[in-house]
Amino acid sequence: MGLAVGFAPTAARATSADDDPAAPRGSLAFMRHVLVAETDEQAHAEMTDDLLRLGALHRPDDATGAPADRHADATVHVRSLVRDEIFVAGSPATVADAILAAHRDLGIDLFLANPYAAGVSDDRVARTLRLLAAEVAPRLAAESAP
């Protein structure tokens, strides 16, 4: 039976992965929200815009602070979502590197990509899926080839 791991950061999972070397090993799946764009900057800018738009939708009466301050806050939040591995976001190379790091650090053999985060348009979901298939998957296959 396989095991799917939710949203604990890789470092937290890696410290427990080798606690018992005699423990039976099975298949390990790893799930993250994913946004793939042509560049890291584009992915992060789109996520920032999503947070600003969602904030305005869910708190229309909370317009405190200047727009520049709200943008700065959203940018910091995006950085934390990526840093804390809630999202794997960026260019195909960045996304592939993150998946390969989880493979190396945790021994995962299945990555579950969730491109359906709140606020993401259908066009961006389609782009993420296209880039995962056309650019990320070949990088993963090349790295795992014998």
Image (spheres, rainbow, N blue to C red):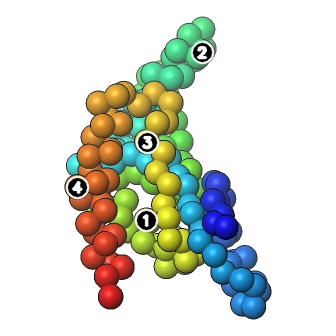
Q: Residue 89, image x and y in percent?
A: 40, 51
Q: Amino acid type of disc 4?
A: Ala
Viewer-closest of 24 and 31: 24
Looking at the rendered image, the quarter that the N terminus falls into is bottom right
| Number of the front mark, 4 or 2 | 4
Q: Secondary structure at mark 2?
A: loop
| Outermost residue toward the front in this view | 1
Nearer the N terminus, badge 2 or badge 1? Answer: 2
Q: Secondary structure at mark 4?
A: helix
**Residue on which disc 2 sits:** 59
CA gap, disc 2 and disc 1: 33 Å
Q: Amino acid type of disc 1?
A: Ala
CA gap, disc 4 and disc 2: 38 Å
CA gap, disc 3 and disc 2: 24 Å
Q: Residue 60, image x and y in percent?
A: 56, 10
| Outermost residue toward the top in this view | 61
Mark identifier at residue 115:
3
> Vertically, is 56 above or below 5?
above
Q: Secondary structure at mark 3?
A: loop
Residue sitting at x 50%, y 71%: 109
CA gap, disc 4 and disc 3: 15 Å
**Residue on which disc 1 sits:** 98
**Residue on which disc 4 sits:** 134
Q: Secondary structure at mark 1?
A: helix
> Vertically, is 70 above or below 112?
above
Residue sitting at x 41%, y 31%: 120
Q: Amino acid type of disc 3?
A: Pro
Q: Residue 55, image x and y in percent?
A: 54, 22
